[in-house]
Image (cartoon, rainbow, N blue to C red):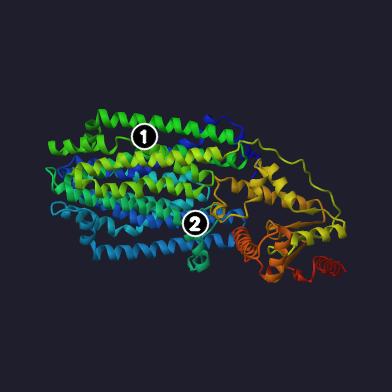
């Protein structure tokens, strides 16, 4: 059980100190990834291949992003599933989730490889290759494609290593590949005269090294162990992995859409200009990778802030949330402004790192940096705010902020503007999208902070109740079956403590979070997606709640209602698990009486509540809610709450004999 005191410092330690502690490792890890993607373009651009070589790699890059979208979907899904299993102490299914992820990643990679070779020219032309660059693109793509299973497996396995509590090892696996790229690229390209094939071979060697490091880790993991049975497909487990990884897939595919549309328009309108189609494709590839360095710094900063934001939001310490947000805005703006100054004042200095080639090339590259990255500071703030919304449990706002800038605004603009402005329209689309995107971002963030009431967290004065040794009764129930009232009657007649809302209050005090926040964790489908992510307050609430339930049970005989207490206390020898249910019509009638609801609303609320409870219970226990095999006694409460309580008490008395 995680020590909650380790989390409480997030609500008291100096924010700047916390940001430095959490953000620096994130930034370094992301910069290493950026370096991996950028090395080839530096050495290729400075070789005899020039901008045509960079155009070729620029065409291939978005295709590889499709592959990594699948790899990260399965990898991040398996990593989240591992965290979920760790949280509920489930060692049985964790290894199977990871094994299934590796198996499906490999199968998809083989399909990708086969389809890639069959349709390679079609794909390359589709993503912007020209008659001049197609041969180079084909040479590069064939080698990269041949090793796509290695690339996808390395990326997929890396996410699981982080979730297993070894972020340093995860970073090392990526760093090994990047270092090999830096060392071998100039050797293969220049002295060995292998050109673009050499760059591709070195990239593959780096990927193989990264995969080997990951495989080595998998032989000495901390919380799971792979066996042959791990690779036997379990559809239910894999469905959970897909659910947990789909957001990563969508994010990566949005990058593919942007690159795809941008490359097509640049190739089309570049061919109509003095620059031709290859220079724009080469330059935009370089621009996007330089741009990714800036964005990865920003992402590293806000990812480092996530645990601070999440914890304090859950604790309703909104002043601290605002202070953290302001500091991140200031730092992000500073990074954006410095970058803008470099891009506007001395773009040629950056461009020459990738080779100077011709005057036309330098002219377009300078134009691209100055126009396309004109408002990069706003892009930084948009990306930062999107991740901020994720940290405070607002996934819809996070998606709106991210997608409006990239998909809703940029994609249509990059299609429409060139019709009136020529190739410059492709470049000016980015800053206009930034302006429109920041307006949406400001509206959402202002509305969000206005919605915070700023109330000070107040925890209830409540303590554990001492009791005599005896049975621990847990009650699970369907909504409207009067399970709470029945549990209270049972506790009163047996003269033992009763816990329902008290569990929430004690868990709130234990974790430092707000009671209302703890109370609502099993009532929202959105929050269940983040249930065991360590940067969310939900994890802290669940951990505190489980600790409280076990503490209550240690005090003696009692009745506990809800909160998956039957699963949490599954190893307690005195446990009696009760499930209370009733026909739907009976429950509708009771809900209408209790809440003065209409029949339609009562039915709707019952179905919603039952669905949320079932999802919560499944995420906690990996068991089916209401399955009779999981309980000692299942009882229909439509016989009346008093009579139901009597049946439960009679059952307990018989067990004691």
Horizontal side of 225 relative to 255 (left or right) equals: right
What residue does disc 2 label? 244
Q: Secondary structure at mark 1?
A: helix
Q: CA distance from mark 1 to mark 2?
A: 31 Å
What residue does disc 1 label? 377
| Position of 377 relative to 572 (above/below) | above
Q: Position of residue 610 (x, y in %)?
A: 63, 63
Q: Is residue 234 visible?
A: no
Horizontal side of 268 relative to 606 (left or right) equals: left
**Number of the label disc, if any, that sits on residue 248:** none
Q: Position of residue 45 (x, y in %)?
A: 20, 41
Which is nearer the eye, 412 or 597? 597
Which is nearer the eye, 390 or 32? 390
Q: Is residue 301 visible?
A: yes
| Mark 2 crowd level (few <14, some 14–19, many ≥20, 10 Å Cα) | many
Q: Position of residue 353 (x, y in %)?
A: 23, 35
| Residue 511 placement: quadrant | top right
**CB-based contact (under 8 Å), mark 1 and mark 2:** no
């Amino acid at each position: 059980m995680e020590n909650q005191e380790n989390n409480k410092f997030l609500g008291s330690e100096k924010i700047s100190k916390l940001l430095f502690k959490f953000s620096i490792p994130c930034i370094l890890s992301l910069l290493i990834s950026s370096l991996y993607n950028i090395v080839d373009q530096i050495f290729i651009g400075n070789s005899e291949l020039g901008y045509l070589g960079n155009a070729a790699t620029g065409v291939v890059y978005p295709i590889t992003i499709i592959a990594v979208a699948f790899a990260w979907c399965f990898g991040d899904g398996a990593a989240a599933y591992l965290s979920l299993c760790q949280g509920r102490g489930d060692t049985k299914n964790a290894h199977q989730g990871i094994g299934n992820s590796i198996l499906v990643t490999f199968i998809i990679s083989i399909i990708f490889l086969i389809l890639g070779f069959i349709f390679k020219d079609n794909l390359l032309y589709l993503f912007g290759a020209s008659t001049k660059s197609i041969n180079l693109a084909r040479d590069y793509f064939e080698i990269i494609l041949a090793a796509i299973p290695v690339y996808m497996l390395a990326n997929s396995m890396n996410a699981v290593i982080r979730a297993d509590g070894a972020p340093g090892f995860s970073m090392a696996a990526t760093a090994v590949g990047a270092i090999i790229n830096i060392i071998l690229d100039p050797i293969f390209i220049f002295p060995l005269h292998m050109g673009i094939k050499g760059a591709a071979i070195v990239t593959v060697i780096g990927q193989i090294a990264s995969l080997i490091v990951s495989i080595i880790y998998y032989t000495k993991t901390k919380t799971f162990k792979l066996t042959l049975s791990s690779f036997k497909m379990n559809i239910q487990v894999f469905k959970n992995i897909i659910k947990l990884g789909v957001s990563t897939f969508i994010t990566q595919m949005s990058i593919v859409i942007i690159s795809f549309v941008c490359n097509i328009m640049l190739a089309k309108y570049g061919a109509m200009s003095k620059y031709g189609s290859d220079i724009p494709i080469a330059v935009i590839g370089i621009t996007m990778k330089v741009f990714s360095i800036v964005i990865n710094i920003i992402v590293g900063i806000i990812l480092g802030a996530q645990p601070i934001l999440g914890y304090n939001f859950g604790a309703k310490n909104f002043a601290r949330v605002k202070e953290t947000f302001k500091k991140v805005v200031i730092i992000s703006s500073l990074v954006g402004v410095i970058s803008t100054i470099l891009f506007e004042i001395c773009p040629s200095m950056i461009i020459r790192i990738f080779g100077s080639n011709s005057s036309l090339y330098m002219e377009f590259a300078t134009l691209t940096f100055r126009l396309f990255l004109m408002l990069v500071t706003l892009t930084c703030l948009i990306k930062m705010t999107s991740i901020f919304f994720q940290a405070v449990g607002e996934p819809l706002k996070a998606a709106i902020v991210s997608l409006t800038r990239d998909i809703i605004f940029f994609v249509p603009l990059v299609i429409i503007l060139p019709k009136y402005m020529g190739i410059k329209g492709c470049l000016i689309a980015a800053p206009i999208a930034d302006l429109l995107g920041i307006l949406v971002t400001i509206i959402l963030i202002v509305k969000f902070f206005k919605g915070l009431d700023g109330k000070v967290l107040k925890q209830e004065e409540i303590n554990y109740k001492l009791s005599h040794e005896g049975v621990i009764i847990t009650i699970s129930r369907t909504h409207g079956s009067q399970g709470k009232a029945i549990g209270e009657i049972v506790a009163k007649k047996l003269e033992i403590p009763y816990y329902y809302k008290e569990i929430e209050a004690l868990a709130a005090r234990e974790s430092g979070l707000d009671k209302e926040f703890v109370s609502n964790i099993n009532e929202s489908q959105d929050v269940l997606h983040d249930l065991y992510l360590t940067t969310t307050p939900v994890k802290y609430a669940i951990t505190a709640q489980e600790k409280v339930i076990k503490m209550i049970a240690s005090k003696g005989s009692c009745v506990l209602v809800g909160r998956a207490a039957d699963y949490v206390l599954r190893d307690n020898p005195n446990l009696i698990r009760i499930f209370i249910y009733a026909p739907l019509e009976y429950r509708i009638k009771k809900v209408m009486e209790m809440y003065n609801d209409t029949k339609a609303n009562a039915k709707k609320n019952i179905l919603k509540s039952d669905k949320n409870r079932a999802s919560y219970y499944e995420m906690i226990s990996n068991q089916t809610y209401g399955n009779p095999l999981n309980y000692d006694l299942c009882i229909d409460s439509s016989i009346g709450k008093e009579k139901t309580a009597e049946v439960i008490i009679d059952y307990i008395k018989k067990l004691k004999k």
